[in-house]
Amino acid sequence: THFGFKSVDVEEKQGKVAEVFHSVAAKYDIMNDVMSFGVHRLWKRFTIELSGVRPGQTVLDIAGGTGDLAYQFSKKVGPTGKVVLADINDSMLKVGRDKLTDRGVINNMEFVQANAQYLPFEDNTFDLITIAFGLRNVTDKDMALESMLRVLKPGGRLLVLEFSKTNNPVLSKIYDTYSFSILPKMGKLIANDSESYQYLAESIRMHPDQETLKAMMQNAGFERCTYHNMTSGIVALHKGYKC
Ligand code: SAM
């Protein structure tokens, strides 16, 4: 940072991420279904189940995008609870807000434009924080994890749903071909945007594996950290508590 090198990288990454999500926002939901063959719905359903969220609780969904998790949480916490959907990108946030408003979710829902590294909330605010397919886009992940810990209530939990490393060599090969050859072509075909999907494939490959992310959560101060592999580790759900 002192010599300006890191800040150039940081700006570059943030700029790229912003560009990608402005570009994919309108087609985001359909692309998600097509690219994952609908399986992202199962990964998210499992996340909701594991969250153990209850009526009256306060939930923060970071990098919440088009609001898949936030929508389910708003039903679970009910009128006495509260859900905050935070995302850095106003295009994604707008698609999410419009979708959830159409579905009649307004009473217990708030939309906030925020960077995961600098969460604009009081200390000890949330019972549950989730970040789904978002952490790999964050420039300084350690900083983001510390920020999440700060705004979590003592006893509260963080769930990180993210692409990870598969332990199945055959699947790994298929998956690599899929991500780097097929995915950008599908992006071109459906959203007329191969570059964004190329970026997404690269960001998945660069993301820390299961044990590394678990260690990062522990370093940030989370306790009782565990993870659960889904689809042979293509995706993992990490969980940690604030004590
Ligand atoms: N959570 C949603 C889901 O699972 O469908 C959206 C995931 S989408 C792949 C990633 C989201 O992360 C985008 O909406 C993007 O704007 C957001 N994002 C990227 N960097 C961020 C940051 N530093 N802070 C907050 N959100 C960020």
Image (cartoon, rainbow, N blue to C red):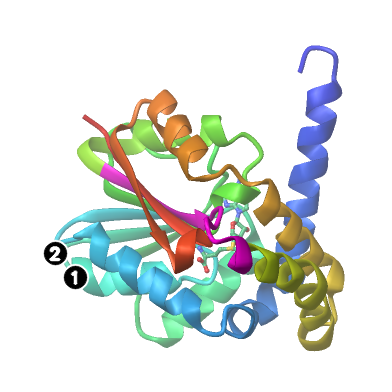
Query: Can you tell which mark lies on residue 55?
Result: 2
Q: Position of residue 239 (x, y in %)?
A: 33, 46
Q: Position of residue 226 (x, y in %)?
A: 32, 43
The CB of the residue at mark 1 lies under 8 Å from ligand 1: no
> Pointer 1 and pointer 2: residues touching (CB < 8 Å)?
yes
The CB of the residue at mark 2 lies under 8 Å from ligand 1: no
- List the single residue furthest toward the front: 170
Residue at 84 percent of width and 81 percent of height: 188
Tell me the amino acid under the disc marked 2.
Pro
| Mark 1 secondary-structure assignment | loop
Instruction: Please name the residue that numbered disc 1 is placed on.
Output: 78
| Mark 2 secondary-structure assignment | loop
Q: In terms of image quadrants, where is residue 117?
A: top right
Work out whether mark 1 precedes mark 2 in sequence or the reverse, and give the earlier one. 2
**Which portion, as a residue range, is magenta?**
157-171
Determine whether 116 is above or below 205 in the image: above
Q: Position of residue 92 (x, y in %)?
A: 61, 67
Q: Nearer the viewer, residue 22 or 120?
A: 22
Residue at 74 percent of width and 45 percent of height: 14
Q: In terms of image quadrants, where is residue 54?
A: bottom left
Quadrant location of ligand 1?
A: bottom right
Examine the structure image and report whether residue 210 is included in the region drawn in magenta.
no
Q: Position of residue 66 (x, y in %)?
A: 53, 72
In screen coordinates, is 11 left or right of 116?
right
Q: Nearer the viewer, residue 122 or 173?
A: 173
Residue at 76 percent of width and 18 percent of height: 1
